[in-house]
Image (tube, helix red, strand yellow):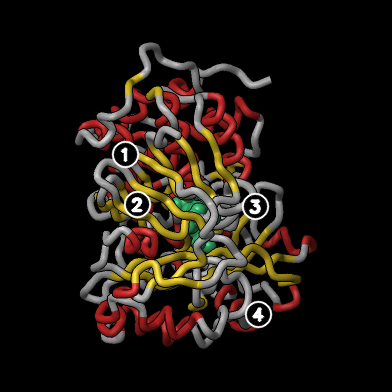
Amino acid sequence: MEPWDVTIVGGGVLGTSFAYWLAARYEGRIAVLEKEANVAAHTSRRNTGVVHRPFYLDPQARRVFARCAQVAYGMWKGYAERRRLPWRPIGTFEVATRPEGVGRLDKYFGWGLANGMGEDELQVLTAAEVRRHEPNVRSHGAIWSKTDTAVDYESFTKSVREDAEAAGARFLLGSEVAAVDVKADHLEVRFAAPDADLVYVDPRRRIRARISQGAEPLRTRFLLNCAGGNSIDLAHRLGVGLEYTDLHFRGEYWEIDPASHFLASRNIYTVPRHPDLPFLDPHWIIRADGRREIGPNAVPVAGPYTYRGFGNPSEIPHKIFESPLRNKLRLLVNPDFLTLAAEEWASSISKRVMTKRAREFLPALKEDNLIRPGTAGVRASVVDRRGIFMKEAIELAGPHSYHITNYNSPGATGAPAYAAWTVLRLARSGLLDHLKPRATKRPGPWDFDAVTAAIEAPAAPPSEAMVAVAGTGPKQP
Ligand SMILES: Cc1cc2nc3c(=O)[nH]c(=O)nc-3n(C[C@H](O)[C@H](O)[C@H](O)COP(=O)(O)OP(=O)(O)OC[C@H]3O[C@@H](n4cnc5c(N)ncnc54)[C@H](O)[C@@H]3O)c2cc1C
C-alpha cells in the first residue's frame, strides 16, 4: 500500500484542526491516528470550556497564543452559530484580591488592546462597581472581559472532524502509536496492543511499549505529532526534543450546588499570585450548560491520563527518573516549582482547602456548596534543561516529522487559528512539498488566507472581521 502523505498523531482539538486544514488545502492521503474510540477524549474535553479572550496574555512573551486566541475567537463564534453548537457569552471578571494586584488590571487592559481586543470588550472596574454587578464577589477591583464565552470543546472537535472528513481526511480511531522507525524517505509507525508484551523500543532511553507484533506497520511520508500529554514521549521516540522533559498536573474542579449558583453570574478569576503559574489560582466557572464549578488545584500525577489517584505506583519512579533527569533535578531549585510544592500539594484534593481559597473572592461560599467532583483534566508542563516550565507551545522538527508539545491553555481557544498558521509555515519551509495543493478552493467554515493574514498582521483586526470571514462557508442544516 502507498504510504500516507501526512499522518497526524492525536485527535484532540489541535490534531483535528490540522486534519481539516491539510485536507482542505491539499490533495493526498491524510490520516489522524487516535488511540481512543473518538476524538477529544482527553484534554480537549476535560478542560474549563472557556473561549479565552487574550487580555491576560503578554503581547510579547505570549505572542503566539495571544494572536491565535484573538483570531480564533471570531472563527469559533461564527462556527458555533452555523453549526448550532453551544455558545454562551458569560464574560469574565478577573479580580484583584489584594491591593498590590490592582496595578495589574490596567496592564491587562493595555495587553487586551495590544492583542486586538476592542475597547468596548474590556472595562476596568473599581471595588464598588464589582459589587454592583456581582454583589457576592469581594475584591479591590477587577477587569471585565465582556466576551469570554462558555463552550463545549468536545462538540467543537467532533464537528471539525466532520469537516475534515468531508475534505478527505481519514480518522483511524483506536490506533495507538507505540514506536516509529525512520526510513530513508518515510517513517514506519508501529501500533500498541494492550495484550502484547512490553518490549524496549529504545533501550538507551529506557522507552518501553506494548508493540502489536502481527500488525502491519503504517508507512507515512510525514508525521505531525499532536499527541498532547504524550507528545514529548512520542518526540523522544524519534530522537527529538531530548533536552525537554515533562511533568503532569491534574486540575480538578468541584461542582457547585444549583441552589448556590446565584453567588456569581460570570466567570470569576483572580489576578494570579504567581504570574508564571496562573493555573494555581482557583476560579469560579460557568459551564456552557449552566453548571458552576470551582477549581482547579494542581495535583502531580504519574501520567497524562491519571484522572483519579496518583497513577500506577510502578510508573511513578519511571516518570521521576526518566531521561533527561537533569531537568527535574534543576526543578528542585526553581522558585516556581517550590511555590507549587509548598502551596498546592498540601491542599491537593481537599474540599475544605479549595473552599477556603475560593472564599478570598467569594466569602459566602461554604464547603457544603461543593457537592461533587466536577471536571478533571491533566496539564502536561514541559521543563527545559534549566529546570524552567516553558510558557508557549514548543515546535520541533524531526526526521520526516514535526512535533508540537506544551500546547497548553488557552490552546483549545486558539487551535483552528494556530493550526492554519502552522500549515502555512510548514508549507513555506518546504515540509509539505510532497503534497499537491488543491487547484480550487474547497468551501469550508473558514478562510485560510484571511485567518493566516490576521495572525501575521502587526495587530490582529477586531474580532467582528473574523466573524464575517467565518461566514463564507456552507450553512449546516
Ligand atoms: C484543566 C485544564 C483546563 C483547560 N481549560 C481551557 C480553557 O478553558 N480554554 C482553553 O482554550 N484551553 C484550556 N485548556 C487547554 C486546552 O484544553 C489544551 O490546550 C487543548 O485541549 C490541547 O489539545 P490537543 O489536541 O493538543 O491535546 P489533547 O486533547 O490531549 O489531544 C491529544 C490526543 O492525542 C492522543 N494520543 C496521545 N498519544 C497517542 C498515541 N501514542 N497514539 C495515538 N493517539 C495518541 C490522545 O488520546 C488525545 O486524544 C485547559 C487545559 C487543562 C488541563
Residue 72 visible at all: no
Q: Is residue 251 left or right of residue 292?
A: left
Q: Which residue is mark 1?
A: 422
- Mark 4 → mark 2, Cα distance in angstroms: 35 Å
Q: Which residue is mark 3?
A: 287
Q: Nearer the viewer, residue 249 or 228?
A: 228
Q: Is residue 113 above or below residue 190?
A: above
Ligand 1 within 8 angstroms of badge 2 C-beta: yes
User: What amino acid does circle 1 point to?
Assistant: Thr
Q: Nearer the viewer, residue 172 or 338?
A: 172
- Mark 3 → mark 2, Cα distance in angstroms: 28 Å
User: What amino acid does circle 3 point to?
Assistant: Arg
Q: Earlier in the sequence, mark 4 or mark 1?
A: 4
Helix, strand or loop at disc 4? helix
On the image, the x and y values in percent for residue 377 come to: 56, 63
- Mark 1 → mark 2, Cα distance in angstroms: 10 Å
* Image point (37%, 45%), residue name: 224
Q: Which residue is mark 2?
A: 404
- Mark 4 → mark 3, Cα distance in angstroms: 20 Å
User: What amino acid does circle 4 point to?
Assistant: Lys
Q: Earlier in the sequence, mark 1 or mark 2?
A: 2
Ligand 1 within 8 angstroms of badge 3 C-beta: no
- Mark 4 → mark 1, Cα distance in angstroms: 41 Å
* Image point (28%, 51%), residue name: 395
Helix, strand or loop at disc 2? strand
User: What amino acid does circle 2 point to?
Assistant: Ile
Residue 330 visible at all: yes
**Of the residues tagged 4 and 1, which is closer to the observer?**
1
Q: Earlier in the sequence, mark 4 or mark 3?
A: 3
